[in-house]
Image (cartoon, rainbow, N blue to C red):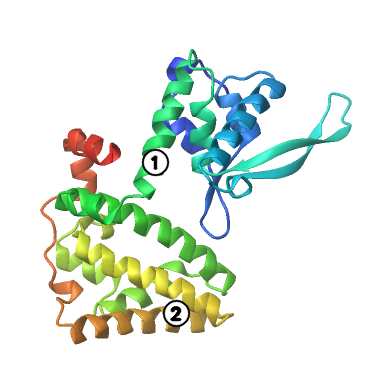
Amino acid sequence: MIKLEKSENYNNQTFEDIKHINEDGIEYWYARELQKVLNYKEWRKFENVINKAKEACKNTDVSVFKHFVDVDKLSKRANNAEVVIKDYKLTRYACYLIAQNGDSRKKVIALAQTYFAVQTRKQEISEKEYSSLTEDEKRFYQRDLTRKGNYSLNQTAKKAGVKNFDKFHNYGYKGLYNGESADDIAKRKGLRYREDILDNMGSDELIANLFRISQTEQKLKKDNIQTEKEANKTHYNIGKNIREVIAKNGGTMPEELPTPKKSLKQLEKEDKKMLNRINSI
């Protein structure tokens, strides 16, 4: 159950807390949950806002059905009787349109407009915009993509029979890093115990790992891998193949790429202005 607070206590985490992610790593929100967060007491009034958002979506020649998915739910009444109620699965863009068509007098609506607009824009960053980012901004962007990619890969690997995920990921690293495990990479980079190695990579190194992650997930699905042993072998082979492509193209091996002086966690604490800039793209 969603615990409601006074609107002035809301922040971006409020919308993260009600976010759902499906088995393919795709994020979505339920309209009924968003209704409560946006301080709409009556579904009837909130559905009017949804209908306006759907119309706005239609006017931009974007598929309404892709962003507003009808869902039927069972709801218990006071006498424990169950009734079917209407709900929607909403994409981030749908939530943004709802916020745009909401009651602007509500403080939480303004927050929602900013949150969903910024996050939607970040997902659609163009090549030109990316090239204008500083190296550290590119690191933040690529790190976010690898985080989402790893989540999706883990879901696919689980279906393939993987139980020991540390071992599974080490197979991928060993293929890409010429035998180095995650611990080996951390030691080479001079990191503290359990410090995230991905937070201590440059953008090029993150891109190589993102390619490893996405290609492994595709291979697991395409070949319908069903055992942990085969999944580990697949991850290793994909990492090794990517390494061979880098070598063939005369690129720099990932272990030879420089380690940034500061981790992303350090930068996040020290440079709020940079984060504000990347969020404004």
Against 67, residue 145 (above or below) is: below
Give the quarter of the figure containing the N terminus.
top right
The residue sitting at 66% across, 40% down in the picture is 88
Q: In terms of depth relative to the viewer, which is nearer, 78 or 193?
A: 78
Badge 2: residue crowd in 10 Å (few <14, some 14–19, many ≥20): many
Amino acid type at image mark 2: Asn
Q: Tell me which corner region of the image, top left, top right, bottom left or bottom right, holds residue 199.
A: bottom left
Q: Relative to residue 271, is residue 39 drawn left or right?
A: right
Can see residue 178?
Answer: no
Q: Amino acid at mark 1?
A: Gln
> Which tag, 2 or 1, sits closer to the chain's start?
1
Q: Which type of secondary structure does the marked residue at label 2 adopt?
A: helix
Pinpoint residue 122: horizontal percent, then vertical percent.
35, 45
| Nearer-the-camera pick, 52 or 178 | 52
The answer to whether one can see residue 189 in this image is yes
> Which residue matches tag 2?
232
What residue is shown with label 1? 119
In the displayed structure, 126 sits above or below 71; it is: below
User: Is label 2 in contact with label 1 (beta carbons under 8 Å)?
Assistant: no
Q: Residue at x 41, y 78 (%)?
A: 235
Camera-near label (2 vs 1) is: 1
